[in-house]
Image (spheres, grey):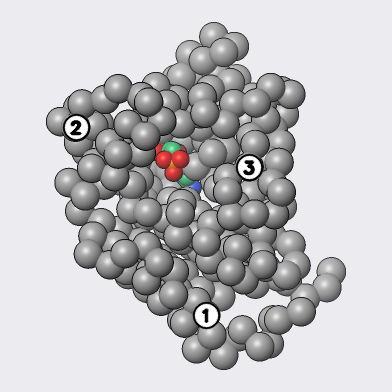
Amino acid sequence: MGTQAPVITVDGPSGSGKGTVSRLVAWRLGWHFLDSGALYRLVGLAALQHGISLEDEQPLGQLAGQLDVRFESDGGVDEGRIMLEGVEVSAEIRSEQVAAAASRVAALPAVRDALLGRQRGFCRAPGLVADGRDMGTVVFPGAQLKIFLTASQQERALRRYKQLKEKGIDVNLVTLLDEIERRDARDGARQAAPLRMADDAILLDSTVIPVEQVVDRILELWQRSGLAGHHSS
Ligand code: C5P
């Protein structure tokens, strides 16, 4: 094994902007990117497609372990194409129905265990930015820089509302806020890898700071850590 590639983890609740932020940080550094939420969404979608009950831990764990997924990126900052069993599902996995299914399968230890190795496999030179809920606490506890990004529930609901509207999906703001509250509660209360800030993570709040500034702040923290030069290729 050569030198381990450096990892920056960005954890936080849904709608905190961590997806956009971590994608931009990865792009600016020229590093790989892991959207771990997409993996849980893919397990949720596959379970719905195969008619597996969202409580049936063993078959869901097996499904997660054998999941045939591909992230096709052209190296740009955009999301790229996400393929499940050879079919593009990039838009489908962003629906509220799949989000709810993802959050339910994510509470099952067998599913989390099955995805662990797959997530760690994303860590390759020159580095990885990992976006999720437990990146800094469970998947990459030795990460060189850990960020916990948050924002108020109202702000997160509003962002999600705008995102879905832009995609032509009709939603109600109050319903969204309700769903976000419920999902936060479930993600925070579950036994397996609940959403919590790692002891050595740095807390950033994107309620009032624009995304670009959050990105700059993370890059600055990385430069200042003294590890940037050490790990540059
Ligand atoms: O981040 P995103 O909204 O795509 O995540 C979907 C769901 O997957 C979350 O609600 C959460 O339950 C789960 N998840 C998780 N651990 C991660 C990433 C996502 O439990 N590292």
* Element marked by disc 3: loop
Q: Quadrant of ligand 1?
A: top left
* Along the viewing direction, whichever of 88 and 190 lies nearer the viewer: 88
Q: Is residue 171 above or below residue 126?
A: above
Q: Earlier in the sequence, mark 1 or mark 2?
A: 2
Q: Secondary structure at mark 2?
A: helix
Point out the frontmost of discs 3 and 1: 3
Residue located at (68% from left, 40% from top): 71
* Classed neighbour count for the residue bearing mark 2: other residues with Cα under 10 Å, few (<14), some (14–19), many (≥20): some
Of the two numbered discs 3 and 2 on the same chain, state the one appearing first in sequence: 3
| Residue 58 marker | none
Which quadrant of the view contains residue 7?
bottom right
Residue depicted at x 37% and y 34% = 166
State the image coordinates of residue 73 (x, y, percent, origin top left): 69, 46
Packing grade of label 1 (10 A; few <14, some 14-19, many >=20) is some
> Is 216 above or below relative to 192?
below
Estimate the x, y position of residue 1 in percent, counting from the top left.
84, 69
As rendered, which of 63 and 212 lies closer to the eye? 212
Which residue appears farthest toward the top when viewing the image?
A: 51
Q: Tell whether circle 3 marks a residue whose Cβ is less than 8 angstroms from ligand 1.
A: no
Task: Provide the residue designation for mark 2.
Answer: 173
Residue receiving disc 3 = 80
Q: Nearer the viewer, mark 1 or mark 2?
A: 2
Q: Residue at x 63, y 42 (%)?
A: 80
Residue 160 in percent (x, y) is at 31, 39
Q: Is residue 113 above or below residue 99?
A: below
Q: Which residue is mark 1?
A: 222
Amino acid residing under circle 1: Trp
Label 2 is placed on what type of residue?
Leu
Q: CA distance from mark 3 to mark 1?
A: 26 Å
Looking at the image, how many numbered discs can be counted on the residues? 3
Question: Where residue 195 sits in the image (x, y, percent)?
Answer: 36, 50
